[in-house]
Image (spheres, coloured by chain):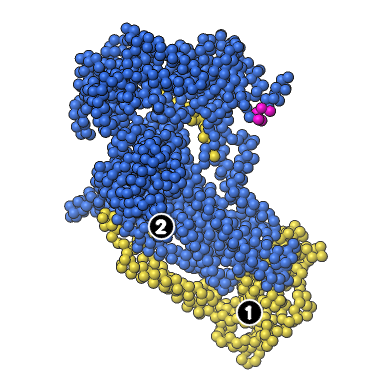
Chain colours: A blue, B yellow
Amino acid sequence: MVSELHRAALCRKDALEEERRVRANDREYNDKFQYASNCIMTSKYNIITFLPVNLFEQFQEVANTYFLFLLILQLIPQISSLSWFTTIVPLALVLSITAVKDATDDYFRHNSDNQVNNRQSQVLIRGSLQNEKWMNVRVGDIIKLENNQFVAADLLLLSSSEPHGLCYIETAELDGSENTPHLSIKSELRQSVSVTSELGDQNNLASFNGEVVCEPPNNKLDRFCGTLYWRDKKYTLTNQNMLLRGCVLRNTEACYGLVIFAGPDTKLMQNSGRTKFKRTSIDRLMNTLVLWIFGFLVCMGVILAVGNAVWEREVGSLFQSYLPWDPPVDNFLFSAFLSFWSYVIILNTVVPISLYVSVEVIRLGHSYFINWDQQMFCSQCNTAAEARTTTLNEELGQVEYIFSDKTGTLTQNIMSFNKCSINRQTYGNIHFTHLFVLGERLDFTPFNPLADPDFCFYDDTLLESVKVGDSHTHEFFRLLSLCHTVMSEEKSEGELIYKAQSPDEGALVTAARNFGFVFRSRTPGTITTTEMGRPVTYTLLAILDFNNIRKRMSVIVRNPEGRIRLYCKGADTVLLERLNPCNQELMNITSDHLNEYASDGLRTLALAYRDLSEDDWEMWSESHRCADKATNCREDRLAATYEAIEQDMMLLGATAIEDKLQEGVPETIAVLSLANIKIWVLTGDKQETAVNIGYSCKMLTDDMTEVFIISGHTVQSVRQELRSVHLPLQLSGVSNYGAVAHISGEFAIVINGHSLAHALEADMETEFVLTACACKAVICCRVTPLQKAQVVELIKKHKKAVTLAIGDGANDVSMIKSAHIGVGISGQEGIQAVLASDYSFSQFRFLQRLLLVHGRWSYLRMCRFLCYFFYKNFAFTMVHFWFGFFCGFSAQTVYDQYFITLYNIVYTSLPVLAMGIFDQDVPDQRSLEYPKLYEPGQLNLLFNKREFFICIAQGIYTSVVLFFVPCAVLSDATQSTGVPLADYQTFAVTTATALVIVVSVQIALDTGFWTVINHVFVWGSLGCYFAIMIALHSQTLFRIFPNQFHFVGSAQSTLLQPVVWLTIALATAICIVPVLAFRFLKVDLKPQLSDTVRKVTQTQCLLDGRLGARGGSRRSGYAFAHQEGFGELITSGKNMRLSSLALANFASRHSSNWIDTLRRKKHNHTHTPPNASGDLGAPQPYKL
Amino acid sequence: MATSYNAKDEDGHITVSGPGGGTLRSRKPENTAFKQQRLPAWQPILTAGTVLPAFFIIGLIFIPIGIGLYVTSNNIREFEVDYTGVDVSSPCFNCSQNYSWNSSRPCTCTIPFYLEQPYEGNVYMYYGLSNFYQNHRRYVKSRDDSQLHGDMDSLLTPSKECEPYAFHDKKPIAPCGAIANSMFNDTLELFYNDPNGTKVLVPLANTGIAWFTDKYVKFKNPGGDGANLTAVFQGTSKPVNWLKPVYELDKNSSNNGFINEDFIVWMRTAALPTFRKLYRTIKDAKVIPTLPSGNYTLEVVYNYPVRSFEGRKRMILSTISWMGGKNPFLGIAYVTVGSVCFFLGVVLLVIHHKCGNRNNSADISN
């Protein structure tokens, strides 16, 4: 029987679980289904499987497989032109580096798995609580949770210490819901099914044997449907009854839950699928280029194989008396075929195996620099910037579009209660600037001992009004103290801590608290406040919760006197419609106030109340109960009952909350704009707020020619509005998409969520992109998280530009994931955005450093690295090609096989890595001062196909020189003892030495920033080359392995010859002089901005140094002192802060400038990079 | 690649948002020059002040060196005679026709030549081969260095690399391989025709022509010095093409067997298909000059067939200087590169003055 069930379970496992049956306290029953245990395993390997699994994974990489294939080829003696170790040593090195990295990662995963799996939880076994490790918790167990404990698995809440089986949980990273976008860490209320809540303590629970039938494991965080069968009754289970793994129990002493999903089946684990692997454009280009190189390799192979065929036919066949063909070879064609593969082996170094690993190492280095950057460390929240992905760094130097969330990103998400309007009277209307605060900050403590000392308010008339006992004012604050979902925690008497769902609410409740209406505590049925020092307990009859459609929330309370009142707060648009008509006049005045507040960039809410009679309440509560119990359309019916009672209300007033901008936001936006980065703000806020924030962070300015607002509700109206924008922009329709017309003036566009929905439709999207991209600033308001992602996708699709999305909340996750680069602000709103992001830091202003400094450097370094890397490998490998023409196309290598093995991994790897990690063209503060320096990255000027071909050409040129110069010199030369120098080994040593020296000189030319490390690596590599060569050619090694070290004595004998050194010097000069001349001409005639900045920086440093030395000279003291101060100002950057001057410049010069870029980019393939005058004519943030 | 879930994340936020926070360790990154990317660094830039002098200096260094090299090279005497015998008129034509590796009767031919200038100091005699692919991959690897190093095991079981010249008649070949098998075996003798009519044999030294390491490290006779070579090589076969076995290459025991210098020289394969190898030295005799100008005869015992693959054989006589033999290319190349650098320097200077961007700071501030 059991085995049958077992088989059935197995079958079901194969055929995917269709429904889950869990019986409480019945392990035997539950075991039949073989549900996953609560042990989670995020690690991939264990000690035994590590090697095979890891190797299998690594060989799924094309490059590794390719080298394995080469290795197999090398084992065929007729083909093998190189010893097997020339491939296996680098391959093993690459594989082991990757393996070590994977192993360390996995080790940490094991550790954290163990830590989590070994957490203790209390399981109810046979009526008593026993401590069990998390991993031993099984489906069907009942476990007890205590306050502040993590939920160990997905639980069905059975009972709790709180009345009505309520419990509070805090969700952190779980939140995927979209209806409360401003929340990620939030307290939520959960309630058990009423029947089980009565079970109470463990004794009753031990005998609980209900059976749950529910949906199979899935990843929907906000949905659960199931049924509880107990004592022949059915109870419907919803998400409200569930406690999900990853949440923390708060404000609840204890609760009991039935494990429904465990371990890998939990919603948390189901949500952690494989992350989408982001690749950078350089990555893609690199892969294309590697494919091209493969093509090139095959071509070379074919050419040489044809050469071999011809040679074997014309010469080789005659030469057979000295050199017979190898046995299987009986004709020249077969020989050519083998020769093709031999050459594939020899020339494979054009696709260096170490490329990918080096790129990874460099990126890792850059990531560490980001993590280590002190200037991206926020001391307030004690968080440093973090590169969560190590593969995207260089793309940070190519960003063209930034999509920014507003709340928590541009703004601090700190709300301060700033103004209010109560009964025709507006309060808090005090203007203050940074310098003068008109009016003093109010001190609440003498009036109210429970006041929050951090609360700021400057208008004492409001306090007066409270003190006087104005009933409207009292009612106003009473509403604020009652109508909310804030939780309070009172650690000691009078020390209140509010936990608010949204900072707005927190601000409002805190305001009420300071003005004498202190919210003290709540239970599910009551709210206790202290009103003007007098404790009052209200009976909470109902909470009519907030959602995005209702845009309001209400509470119905009964005060101690027994009067029932509904308090409602909500968006003015919805609330003002639901007022009693007698409020008309008050409403007009309040509306004026509301408009005034909104134009100041404040977030507004209107407040109202309604008195309910006992009958009203009874009636409504009955209909509410009905709606609540409805099985279908419950939501709609509830909304309808809410709607029914929120009518006929009396207006109390309005509140205005200031959404504080983060530090340095306007400056950052200005700098980024100067760097030709376009910033789009995508916010869920309403239009007015969004526009106001736009103004306050200088995205929108009063100088703008026009700010278009698109808020149509229908397709036609949106199209019409978009078209009307075309006229001033002088865009003639979609047909003219390619040509960006000359745009005079600056425009901005503000588009509403509902219009955006139409604009994103297939037939209008090109039009929308065209219009939006012609505007200087774009603000999308009232957008949903999905739309945010759609906008990002739109730009990715149409502009082929690198996009960056920055946000802090759960609603930004989709946008962060779909953009090329996602940045999470680790701030107030939990860590979900951070978890989804590639980079995270805590202040928006760090973005400029991330992009302009780290991104720019990363891009520059990666480009220089790639250029040099391809160059050095072509220079190295192509020598074999030329030699082929002189050795009968026999695939004889020019170099010693040890040299071939070590060239890429020892002799030339470290200097280029050092350059790739440490190089800088201009110091960091310069790239912030001259945002224009960012442009080459956007235009992709430093490494593209053209640059690649230049590198390749240079590499091939070098290989020609390196082969033919020694060839010409040595063929007739002799040692001073008369022994000819034209023997193979001397030739090999000479060419190899020349090669190492030439590439070292070349890296010396390429390196712009010689730190100690660069010196050590460059000189060390050269030293290493000579040391290793002399060691390999030594007599000792030869005596031990005479068959392995054929080159005995070559190094000594060759390197002592003056002719050899003359040859090397000659070859080096011929290789380097043209490069030097070309580079000099480029810098001299068409300097890039970076060259100029570099030069200026350096001359200033020199100047400073010289002046410092002259400090002692009294005679020239005065004249130089004057200049010295000036120089110091410049170098310290004190006078170069982006000031108002810069902002003014930015405003006036920006438009022509970024259009230039756009245009240049379009014609990029035909035109050479922008010339110096164009660059330098660009706006400069300051004058020297 | 990794799953995005990490158990650390699960409790990660708690430490941050936990109430109170307590004494949190500051996570401020260290302020070191390395971590903040502020390592002191030298930042070279290509300016007219550095590049142009570099060009002139390269020019000024290279041109004199080139001239020196050229003059030195020109002072070296070199004489070359092709004795392949391609032309019917050539003295060696007959020998070249009836070629066979194992002809029992050696064919001899005599080539007269005239040296216009006297050769002073040490004179070196080379043989040169053309169109001979000593650098072919299969040829290069066809040897057993451990056999040549005197290893007894390898002597009797040569490496597979030597195939098909590893065994002959089931006896191991010593020395094995294609290189050894094709060893150059012409004998060249030089006679000075005294103006008074007598034919004087010019003494040729056949030692001191190989690399020191080759002679004393790389090549060793099996059994060590002073062993009886005939006995040691008992049981091995001579290479197929050879006339006599390896232990009969020279009567001088320090130049016999594997350490015969002619053999060592041959075994040092050439890099290019046209090459020369040192054959003999004519040491600075008491006679001054070593080779006076006049008529000479080269007597060749013609054993080595090259016509089958259109090869050529040459005999070269050369004197030598500090930089080796005659090598006009190096001097010319140095002069050319030096002049080009100098010229480039001038051109760049002109360009720099005419249209160069010298006033950068002005640009940047305007």
Q: Label 2: state its secondary structure.
A: loop
Vertical placement of residue A1047 versus A757, above or below: below
Instruction: Specify the segment rendered in magenta.
Output: A11-15
- Quarter of the image holding residue A219? top right
Which residue, given by chain and number where applicable, does mark 1 sit on?
A: B315
Q: Is residue A193 left or right of residue B313?
A: left
Query: Is the N terminus of chain A in the top left, top right, bottom left or bottom right quadrant?
Result: top right
Furthest toward the bottom, the residue is B196
Furthest toward the right, the residue is B169
One can see residue A216 in this view: yes
- Quarter of the image holding residue B273? bottom right
Residue A155 x %, y %: 54, 20
Nearer to the camera, B361 or B144: B361
- Quarter of the image holding residue A506? top left
Nearer to the camera, A686 or A998: A686
Tell me the amino acid under the disc marked 2: His
Residue plotted at (43% across, 15% down): A624
Q: Numbered disc 2: what chain?
A: A
Residue A886 x %, y %: 61, 69
